Image: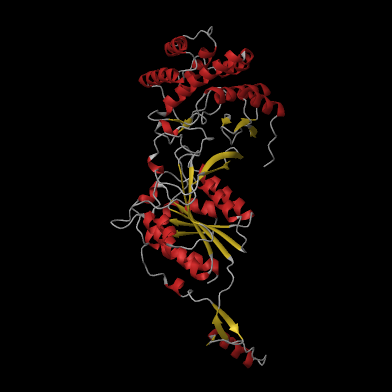
Amino acid sequence: MPALPEPPAALTLLLQALSARRLTLQTLPPAGPDRPEVRPILTPQHLLLPARAPELQRAAVAHAAAHLLHSVPSQPTATLKPLGLAVVSAVEDARVEQLLAGQLPGVRAWFDAPLRDALDPQGLSAAALLSRLDLALHDEDHADGNHWVNKARTLFDAARRAHGLEDAAAFRRLASVLAHDLGQMRVRFEPRAFCVPCAYRDDHSYLWNHGAARDDEAQPLEQPLATPGAPPRDSDTRPALEPVRIHHYPEWDARSGVLRRDWCTLHDHGTPPPTSDAPAQPPHRSLPLHRRQGLGRRQRRQPEGVQLDLDALVDDEVLRRLRLGPSGRVFQRPGVAAPVLSLLLLIDSSQSTATHTGTGPSLLQLEQEAAFLLAHAAADTGSRLAIHAFNSDTRARVHYRRLLDFGMRPEAMALARLQALRSEYSTRLGAALRHAGSVLATEARTQRVLLVLTDGSPSDVDVHDPHHLVEDARHAVLRLRAQGVAVHGLVVGEAAADDARRIFGPGHYRIARSALQIAHQLTAWHAQFAGR
C-alpha cells in the first residue's frame, strides 16, 4: 500500500505545546468502502490522526492535549458496561475540554463546528443521544427538548459549581446516573457498531484499562513499577533478582493498515527465583527414543579412530566396486562439533494453560516437563537454548519472564524457576515475539530459531476483534523472518489450527492433538533444527 503522508509539523508542535509533552503524531488512512470510520487514537507516547480536514485535526490535537493534561489514563472499568463506558467517556470529554478552554479560551471555537456537524437533533439511539449530550454540555445556550439531555446538563452544572471541574470523581458519579437512566429507557446500544459521534474526539482507549479491577493497577505507562508503599498485586508477589525492564513495541492494525508505534508496554521480569513451594528437583522421565539416539556426538568418516563407521564402510565399498578407489575414511571417534543452533522456546503461560487434562497434570505442567526435557536435549547436543514465558494484562502490561537464558546450563535453580511459572492473564503474542526476536538478535549463530509453544489463538481483554492480534502476530513473524530468525509454532489442540496456519504459515507449525504429545513434538522439532 502507498506510504501514508506525515502529519503537518505544525500539528506536532501544537500538540507538544498544548500538552507540555514530547509526543509523536502518525497518520491513519481515511475511511473507505472496505474500512469503517475511525477515530483518533491517543496513547501517552503518541497520537494517531485520521486523514481529515485540517480543522478536524486541529480540534483532535487540542482534545488529545486536554486528556493528557486533565485525565487519568488506564482507569479500571470495574463493573461498567459498554453503555456506561460510552456515557462516562462523553462526560469526561466535556470536562477536560472545558478545563482546557478555561486556560486557553480560544480553543473553544475549535470544538464548536465539529460538534454541531455531528449532532443528530431528533435521534433517540444511543449514538444520537450522545451527540446531543456533547453539544448541550459544550454550548449552554443550545436548546434541546430531550428530558435526558437536559437532566445531564443540570447535573453537570451542579457538579461544576459544587466540586469544580478538577474533581473527576464527581463527574464520573453523575455519568453513572445518566447511564443508568439510559438503561431504564431501554436505549439500544451495540458496542461493536458504536463509534464516538464527533469526528475529532478519540476512541477513548486512552482512558480505560479493560483488564484492571483495582485502583492500584490504573497507572500511567511511564510508571513500570508499583508505587512505593502500595500493596503488591496478587500475581506479582514473587521477588525478582533483576529490576523489571520496560520496553515499548509496535502493534500492527490490519484494519487500518498502520503499525502503531510504541503501542504495547512489555515488562521484562528477568529471571525471578522460584517460589518457596516449588519442588527442589524437576520431574524425571525417560527421553523420547529419537532424542536418546542423538546423545553421542561423533566425528564420522575419519581416517583413524576407535570404532568403524558403518555408513562410511558401505559408501567405501560402493566406491571400490565402481573402481573409484576407496577413501579409507571409515572410522569414527568421539568429538563435539561447534554449536550452530540458538533456539529460544517461548512458552504461553496464559490463564488457559491452567486447564487440567482429565485427572492428570495441567497443561502448564506438561509444558514445563517438556521444556525440561528439551533443555537437557539441547545441552547434550551442544545447542544454545533459552526458555522464556509470557502472558499479557492488556497492551499496558505484557509480562515476559526469562526462565533459562542463553549460556546458562539447566541446573536445579533454573529448572526450579521453570516449575515456579504460573498460569495467568491473556495471550498478546505479537509483543512477546518482537521482544524474543530482539533477544535472538544478540546470538551470533548460523541458525537462530524461535519456537512458540501455545494452546490457543492470541487474545487479550482490551481487544474485541478476534482477528486483530492474529494479524499482529503474523506481522511480527514476517518481520522476524526478514531479519534471519526462523519462527515456528507448536500448538496444543486443533481449535487454533486455522490461526496457527495464518500466523506461522504452512510447514512452520505443528499441532499436538493431545497435551501428552508436547514433549515428543518439542524434541522432534529440536532434532530437526539441530540436524539430528
- Residue that appears at 64% across and 33% down: 24
Q: Position of residue 420 (x, y in %)?
A: 39, 53
- Residue that appears at 44% across and 29% down: 190
- Residue that appears at 53% across and 51% down: 503
Instruction: Relative to 335, say whether 440 is above or below.
Output: above
Q: Is residue 15 left or right of residue 452?
A: right
Q: Position of residue 78 (x, y in %)?
A: 39, 30
Q: Quadrant of residue 417?
A: bottom left
- Residue that appears at 50% across and 64% down: 525
Given residues 359 and 396, the one toward you in this image is 396
Given residues 149 and 298, the one toward you in this image is 298
Q: Position of residue 526 (x, y in %)?
A: 50, 65
Instruction: Relative to 181, say whether 532 is above or below.
Output: below
Q: Position of residue 224 (x, y in %)?
A: 51, 38
The answer to whether residue 507 shows anywhere in this view is: no
Given residues 457 and 527, the one toward you in this image is 527
Q: Is residue 94 left or right of residue 361?
A: right
Q: Where's the N terminus, which quadrant? A: top right
